[in-house]
Image (spheres, rainbow, N blue to C red):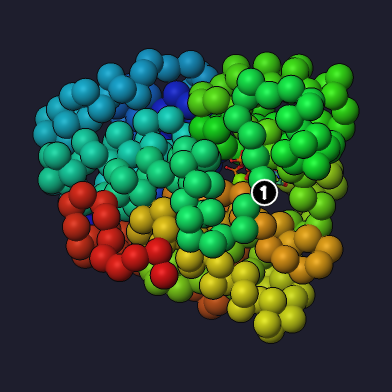
Amino acid sequence: MKIAVLMGGTSAERDVSLATGREIARALRQGGHEAVGIDAADGRLIGGPQASGELASAIERMPPERGELVQLAGGQLTRSLEQSPDLQGTEAVFIALHGGAGEDGRLQALLELIGMPYTGSGPLGSALAMDKLVAKELFVSAGIRTPPWLVAPVGSTAVESALGGFPVVVKPSHEGSTVGVSVVRSAEELQGAIEQAAAFDGVPIVERFIPGRELAVGVLGDEALPVVEIRPRHEIYDYECKYTRGMSEYEVPAPLSPECTEEVQSLALKAHRVLRLYAYSRVDMRLDHESRPWCFEVNSLPGMTATSLLPKAAAAAGISFEELCERIVRLALVRERPTGTRPGGPG
Ligand SMILES: Nc1ncnc2c1ncn2[C@@H]1O[C@H](COP(=O)(O)OP(=O)(O)OP(=O)(O)O)[C@@H](O)[C@H]1O
Ligand SMILES: [Mg+2]
C-alpha cells in the first residue's frame, strides 16, 4: 500500500513527532508498504519512497522553524496528495504528529472531507482527548477517578479549600509531553506556575498532586495492552524523564496484583471509550498509596518510536512494532463512522 506518513508540524512537540514518524515510516517499509514521509509544517516531502536512509538524514538537517500546519490543512496537503509525483496514489495517511492541528481533530476532519483514510481517532475523539478539561469532565461523568481540579485564575485560598492544600500540579489544558507542567509546593509559587502554563495553549489547570506509582496503559483495537510502570528519576514524569535515556526505568507488565491489573486495564478502556477514541491510545494514570488508580489524560496520538510506551506494551503482548503499525493501518481502512463517533456508550 502507498502510505503518506505525516510528521513534524509546528507544535511544541515537533521533535518528538519527527522521531515517531521516522520509525513508523521505517516499520511500514519493512512491512512491504511504500511509505512517504511528509513534514506537515510545509507539505514538503522529507524522503521519497525509496529513501529510507535519506529520510533520517533529511530530518536531522531540517531547521526547527516552519510555516503553519493550518496552511497545509487549508489546501497544501490536498494539493500535495494530488500533484506531487511522490504522493500520487496515496491510499492512506499515517498521522505521526503530536499536538496542535494534527492531534486536536482539525487534520482528521480535513482528511474525512477529502475522503482519505487516516490512522487513529476521528475529529470528535481527537478534540475531546486534546482538551484536558473536557476530558476530565467526561471522566467524572463516567465514574473514572481523576484528580480534583480548578481552572485558572486560582488563588491559594481556593487551593486550600477545594484541593486540600499543596502540593498541586499546574498544567496547560492543551499541551503534551509535560510541556509547561509543574509541581507547586507553596502559595508563593502558585501564580508563577500558572503564568508559565498560560504561555501554552488552553487555560491552566490546577490539580491535586497524586503521590504514587506512575502507570501507562495502551489501548489497541478494543483491548487494553499490558500495563507499563514508569519509574522516573524526578518526582513527575517530565520532559527530561520522557526523552533522556536513563532518566526513567520501565517495567512491563507492571508488577501489580491480577485484580489491580484488571482494574487499571478496564479503567483505561473506559477512558478510551468515553472520549470516543478509535484504534489506539495511551491512558496516563497514577496508582496512589491505597492502590487506587487516578486517570490524568488519554493521548490520542501517543509516542510511537520503537521504545515509546505503547510499542513497549504491545511488545509485551507479543506484537512487534511492525505488526503494531500494520494493525493501526488496517483499522484506518475499516473505520465505521465518518463523524468519528463510535457505537456504544461510555460503558
Ligand atoms: N495531578 C497530578 N499528580 C501527580 N502527578 C501528576 C499530576 N498531573 C500530572 N502529573 C505528572 O506529570 C506528568 C504529565 O502529566 P499529563 O499526562 O497530564 O501531561 P502531558 O503533558 O499531557 O503528558 P503527555 O506527554 O503524556 O502528553 C504525568 O505523567 C505525571 O507524572
Ligand atoms: Mg501524559
Q: Nearer the viewer, residue 44 or 221?
A: 221
Task: Please state, as top left, top right, bottom left or bottom right, where the N terminus lies in the image.
Answer: bottom left
Task: Please state, as top left, top right, bottom left or bottom right, where the C terminus lies in the image.
Answer: bottom left
Q: Nearer the viewer, residue 265 or 77?
A: 265
SS class, disc 1? loop
Query: Along the horizontal axis of the image, is 12 left or right of 70?
Result: right
Q: Where residue 143 appears, x then y in whole percent?
A: 54, 62
| Corner quadrant of residue 205 | top right
Q: Where 184 falls versus 343 (above or below)?
A: above
Q: Which residue: 28% across, 19% down?
A: 71
Q: Nearer the viewer, residue 174 or 313?
A: 174
Q: Where residue 305 appears, x then y in whole percent?
A: 54, 51
Q: Residue furthest bottom?
A: 258
**Within 10 Å of the Cα at label 1, are there few (<14), some (14-19), or many (20+) other Cα atoms?**
many
Q: Where residue 234 appears, x then y in whole percent?
A: 84, 43
Q: Where residue 22 appears, x then y in whole percent?
A: 46, 44
In the picture of the structure, the residue carrying the numbered disc 1 is 147
Q: Which residue: 18% across, 24% down?
A: 75
Q: Is residue 41 visible in the rendered structure shown here?
A: yes
Q: Is residue 39 visible in the rendered structure shown here?
A: no
The amino acid type, in three-letter code, at marker 1 is Pro
Whether ligand 1 has any atom under 8 Å from the Cβ at mark 1 is answered as yes
Q: Where 264 falls versus 311 (above or below)?
A: below
Q: Nearer the viewer, residue 267 or 313?
A: 267
Query: Along the horizontal axis of the image, is 171 left or right of 249?
Result: left
Q: Which residue: 88% across, 28% down?
A: 186
Q: Where 143 falls versus 206 (above or below)?
A: below
Q: Which residue: 66% across, 27% down?
A: 180
Q: Where 15 falls versus 275 (above or below)?
A: above
Query: Along the horizontal axis of the image, is 347 left or right of 310?
Result: left
Q: How many labels were placed on the picture?
A: 1
